[in-house]
Image (cartoon, helix red, strand yellow):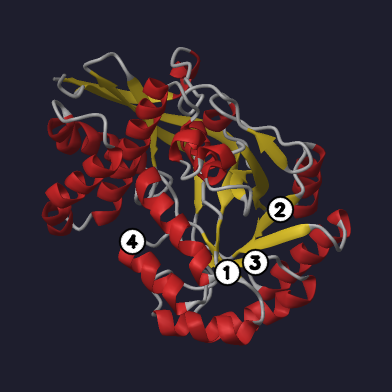
Amino acid sequence: MAAPTIARVECWVFRAPIDVPVATAFGHMDSRPAVFLRLSASDGAWGWGEVFCNFPQVGAEHRARLVADMFAPLLLGAASDDAPATQAALQARVHRVAIQCGEPGPFAQVIGAIDQALWDMAARRAGQPLHRLLATDPAAASGRVRLYASGLGPARVGEMALARRQRGYDAFKFKVGFGPERDRANFAEIRAVLGDDAVVMVDANQAWEPQDAAARIAELAPFRPHWVEEPMAADVPVAAWAQLARGCGVPLAAGENLRGLPAFEEALAAGFLRFVQPDVAKWGGLSGCRAVARLAPAHGATFCPHWLGGGIGLAASLHLRAALGEAGFAEVDANPNPLREEVFDPQPAHGWVQLTDAPGLGVEPDLTRLARYRITSCSCYG
């Protein structure tokens, strides 16, 4: 019997208003966008994925046009039962045009969502939760994931952290890169609220220049950060990252802005990352990020997937972390976002969440409920 093929490609652009912009060291978000992708196959199976689209503010609409104009024609009629093979084929097919138009990132983001959707479809066909299908040893995939609440700050960090602890979180990450005095004051505030034993990470969002990063980390080191994330730009040479790691005495984390397995292999081999953080919607989807996660232990690194978006990608991220055992953390954005909260919003107990045994991602967005946030949509048939 012929393998089922992709018969329909659909995507929806959503944008939810928020009262307080989400601030980082490099910019802010005035709304919460999402691009949800659904692939349907000739046998009636379907699967969901999510495309990274936080920046720039017009990114969501742009990614949706890429889906409709560039990728749907390549997908319709293609086999739907081998996500890694499809991912590799798409990367090869669009490699040169991505270079030509200067957009390897957006192209990789769309491919990441396609890969998520094909894995979700495969797990639905198998009648298994996705974490079990992704696992090397399904019996060891308990479905339990330790979460941390991220995106705290740069204002009201203590208040935000306490609110998340009351919701069941026991690990927290807040934003730095807003000046030494403010960063130290925020860390002092969060320690005063949570106590000296709480697990607290910081995220600089590439804020510091290589010549300044060691000094900035040293100023925060007395507060005992569990890790410092992206202290420098992701494209700073590996040698500078290794030098910083040797001298700062604080574990470093990065990966959301690396693209391509060779880049991760180089970073892990250099040994400067204690925590590696690929993002299933920015590069590689589940196939690529799982490959990175499997490499990490041999280099002394722990896989902690990055996520800042809607509920579909969050579910994919948690299933991948769960597939690899109970080490490490998965990220959950602490800021209000209806496109997460109304799709998939895990509620931890003592820092942990138990994924369900529902097939696939276990997520089925209510498009009628989300209609008030919809900006546009597209649908392509074979």
Q: Earlier in the sequence, mark 3 or mark 2?
A: 2
How far apart marks 2 and 4 lie (CA) works out to 28 Å
Residue 327 horizontal/vertical position (percent): 63, 53
Residue assigned mark 3: 227
- Residue position marked by numbered label 2 in the rendering: 172
Q: Earlier in the sequence, mark 1 or mark 2?
A: 2
Vertical side of 167 occupied by 372: above or below: above
Image point (75%, 70%), residue name: 184
> Circle 2 sits in a helix, a strand or a loop, which is it?
strand
* Residue 256 visible from this viewpoint: no
Mark 3: amino acid: Trp
**Mark 2 or mark 4, whichever is nearer to me:** 4
Q: Secondary structure at mark 3?
A: loop
Tag 2 and tag 4, C-beta contact below 8 Å: no
Q: Look at the picture and state if 27 lies above or below 311.
A: below
Of residue 363 and residue 139, the one placed in the foreground of this image is 139
User: How far apart are the alpha carbons under marks 1 and 2?
Assistant: 17 Å
Q: Residue at x 84, y 61 (%)?
A: 197
**On the picture, is 257 further left or further right than 174?**
left
Number of the front mark, 1 or 3: 1
Q: Is residue 225 visible?
A: yes
Q: In the image, is residue 16 above or below residue 177? A: above
Q: Which residue is mark 1?
A: 274
**Pointer 4 with pointer 1, Cβ within 8 A:** no
Q: Badge 4: how crowded within 10 Å, few (<14), some, or many (20+)?
A: some
Q: Amino acid type of disc 1?
A: Arg
Give the residue type at disc 2.
Phe
